[in-house]
Image (cartoon, helix red, strand yellow):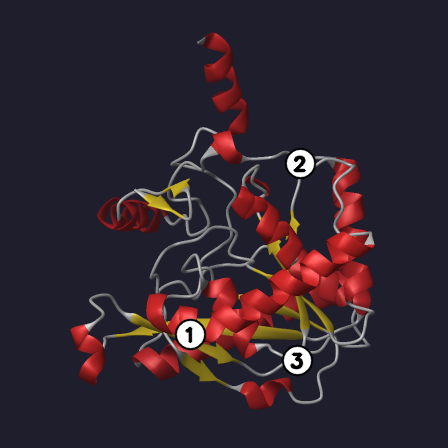
Amino acid sequence: MKYAGVEQLPYEEQQKNIKIAEEKGNYNCEIQEPDWRLMQRVDENFQYKRKGFLKKLATFLIRSSFFAFAKPGCWFLIGDGYHGRENLRGIKNCVFVCNHVHNLDNEMSRWLCWGHKLYIVVAEFNNMNTFLGGVMRAGGIFPLSANFSAMKKFTAAVNDVLHQKRGSVLFFPEKSMWPYYEQPRPFMDGAFHSAALNNVPVIPLFITWREPRGIEKLFFKRKRAEIHALKPVYPKAELSRKENIAWLRDEAFREQCECYKEVYGRVPDTINAKFTLEEIFQKGYEAYLAEQAAK
């Protein structure tokens, strides 16, 4: 099965792997092997901020198209519930963090966060050597990298955005996408490091799921998404940067847990879960390269 040209496990297998990961207490692993054939490595030459008139024009046109697509496209493919816009009032620069539960959760976030110039942090394997990859780059993705020099440029680009007029950056601090997953999952620190370093608030976003209702039942079989903008969390002047990272991370996660409890009527099982980098369903890019070399 393919989604936007990328190989995907069938939904049932994805959910089976999620159950296995839950049983292991591993809430951050990828639940399938990425399509390494499509990955374009991010090195020190990667342009996080596009330069030149034609590239900037392309970026403007593609960003406008993404925004125009966001609401009708998401209604058709994922859901159309938007809540909490009032929590964005008066916020000029910020870091958004969202649970990662669908290929289009970034588009739901884009619509909810309109008025902010949004850049989206993605895994390196989402930096693809395809037409779609080019569109995503023009649309404002900031891919992570295993290259130290590239990550220095990544950090500089994030810092630059957070000092631009209404510049903001969206992170998915759970690290991996778990389709249609309901509970909040533990966070890695990167998003909160950027917020603490630049003294900007973190605004947690949280996507919840509900059964189709009314006329929706005629068109949709799977659950429908609703996205919530929660209250901003501000760095504290009296805390060190390290302490602020922990404060922002834990408070943003607490807000997601509270939203989960309010929507579903129960405390999430993940409330005391710990972040882990262990991968249990993928061999990794180096193993892929070794396999290709052995052929």
Q: Nearer the viewer, mark 1 or mark 2?
A: 1
Q: Earlier in the sequence, mark 3 or mark 2?
A: 3
Mark 3 vs mark 2, CA separation in Å: 32 Å
Q: Please tell me whether residue 67 is drawn above or below residue 160 in the rendered image.
A: below
Q: Nearer the viewer, mark 3 or mark 1?
A: 1
Q: Position of residue 271 (x, y in %)?
A: 43, 66
Residue identifier under label 1? 72
Label 3: which secondary element? loop
**Residue kind at label 3, given as amino acid type:** Gly
Dot 2 alpha-carbon crowd within 10 angstroms: few under 14, some 14 to 19, many 20 or more: few
**Residue kind at label 1, given as amino acid type:** Pro
Residue identifier under label 3? 115
Left or right of residue 125, residue 103 in this image: left
Dot 3 alpha-carbon crowd within 10 angstroms: few under 14, some 14 to 19, many 20 or more: few
Q: Which residue is located at x 35 percent, y 74 percent?
A: 267
**Residue kind at label 2, given as amino acid type:** Ala
